[in-house]
Image (tube, grey):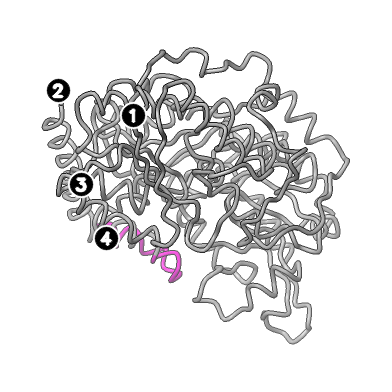
Amino acid sequence: MKSTRRVTSALLAALLLTGTAACSEGGPDPADSSPQMTADAAETPEAAAETEEEGDAAYIDSLPEADYLGADFGIYTSNNINSWTLPTTLNHADEETGEVVNDALFARDRWLEDRYNVNPDFTVDGTTPAGSMAAPLEKNILAGDSSYHLILQDVACVAKPLTLDGCAYPLNLVDGIRLDEDYWMPELNGELRFGENLYLCASAISPRFYGSVYLYLFNRDLAGDLGMMPALYDLVREGGWTLDRQYEMAAEALADLDGDGSFGSEDRYGLCWEVLTPEAVVLGCGYHLVKNVDGALSFMIDEEGLVDVLLAMGENFHKDYAFQDSGRTKLNVNAILNGGQFLFLNTCTFNLAEYRDFAFDYGILPMPKKDEAQPAYISYAQPWVVVSPVIPVTVAGDALSMTGTLTDAMAAYGYDYLRPAVFENVIQMKGTRDEQSAGIVDSLFDNVTFELATIYGFGSFYSSFTNAFENNQAENLMSVWAKVRKGAEKELDRISAAYDETAEKLKGN
């Protein structure tokens, strides 16, 4: 797992020890796409460069020179995820607005124009839901349409089907994309390889990577009332924030506030979890449902240590102190969350904007470790947010070489300038209310990982996994696995073979 912005242990410890709260009361409606910062606060590329940690490289300075004589560079993307338009969802900016991420994107495109003598020609789809984008794109590609040199869309809904159906190059076969460079996060993306080929890839080419990581938001006011402050931050700093401690503290927070002898929407809970929480916990404990070793994939579900984690999750996630944020619960989830009637809430950095209006102070914690012997905290990046660059197979010859060079340049620029813009000005400054949490948010990106089962499903394997937790049947996971194993392994082999076949067809294109 590769660091995308590493904070030193000493710096993190100092931040966690700081007692000063940096409050930012109120905030915009999450669906409001209006500028959130004044022009005076926006960073130019030059100012953003000054925020880089000492010793960080300016990757754009090492890029090769090229002149494309004013050629069009067609890019298909979007600026929203479903109904959300936020700094963490943007991929293109038509003009400067004073919002720091928007202006960094605008500056990137002007930089491309100037450095490469090229015309970035964006199609920004503001109406098609992500789940409906892949089919028309695939139809056009298979019909030979070469309008788009590059597609910037999410891994799960768009990049996966396009690559799996033979509509896109493996990125390692595209000249000009230097996948070994740190701005492509090679260690992290190694977890997405099939054999020698990399079809899906995370990078700083889009701000969305920094909105994709799972964490725990916690009610600081309640934690203080329960005597857990500053113990929670001490646990994180000392490496003792574990799954067992989370369960213990969540149980302590449970309270029948209305005194009616049962637990309903008027009471207080320890843990609110959601549909992606089970895999976020599994990966946080150092496991995968499907592991990838040098491009070779295998199922991990029956590994002894993982089974122990899964059984404990199945038991604890359905105790009185816990509930799932879904239509399955009869609880008024919004009332519980807005009323501060919870201790822990599992969410991802993309959703932090939802919680700016909480009337109570909240803090941030990483996903817990399995135990204190685990060397580091590990974060799960969910594939419905992460953007993967997709290069259609209709791009060929000189156009393909140009696309590779420009895609590589966008990733390098993104690491140098988009990364600090979205990370330091949006996720930290706008999504957290205390300096200890700011340090933790920083450290979340030291160890990020993916889960291939979430992306590919592998037959009914992934749906069986999620259904077991949603229906409180985790104790039956092994018997369910025995039933679906043959089909899951067959689907894994089919996907691997499809990718290998595409790569063989495209070699030397």
On the question of residue 504 being in view, the answer is yes
Specify whether residue 476 is painted magenta. yes
Identify the mark nearer the N-term, 1 or 4. Answer: 1
Contact, CB < 8 Å: mark 1 with mark 3?
no
- Is residue 302 visible to us here? no
Region of the chain picked out in magenta, as a range: 467-482
Q: Calculate the distance from the C-alpha at mark 4 to the C-alpha at mark 2.
A: 36 Å
Position of residue 138 measured from the top left corner of the image (x, y, whole percent):
22, 51
Q: Earlier in the sequence, mark 1 or mark 2?
A: 1
- Pointer 1: what residue? 71
Q: Depth-wise, is mark 1 or mark 3 nearer the camera?
A: 1
SS class, disc 1: strand
Residue picked out by circle 4: 460
What SS does tag 2 mark? loop
Contact (Cβ within 8 Å) of mark 4 with mark 2: no
Separation of marks 1 and 2 at Cα, in angstroms = 23 Å
Task: Please tell me which residue is depicted at 50% across the width and 43% down the height of the picture.
Answer: 92
Reading the chain from its start, which is encountered first: label 4 or label 2? Answer: 4
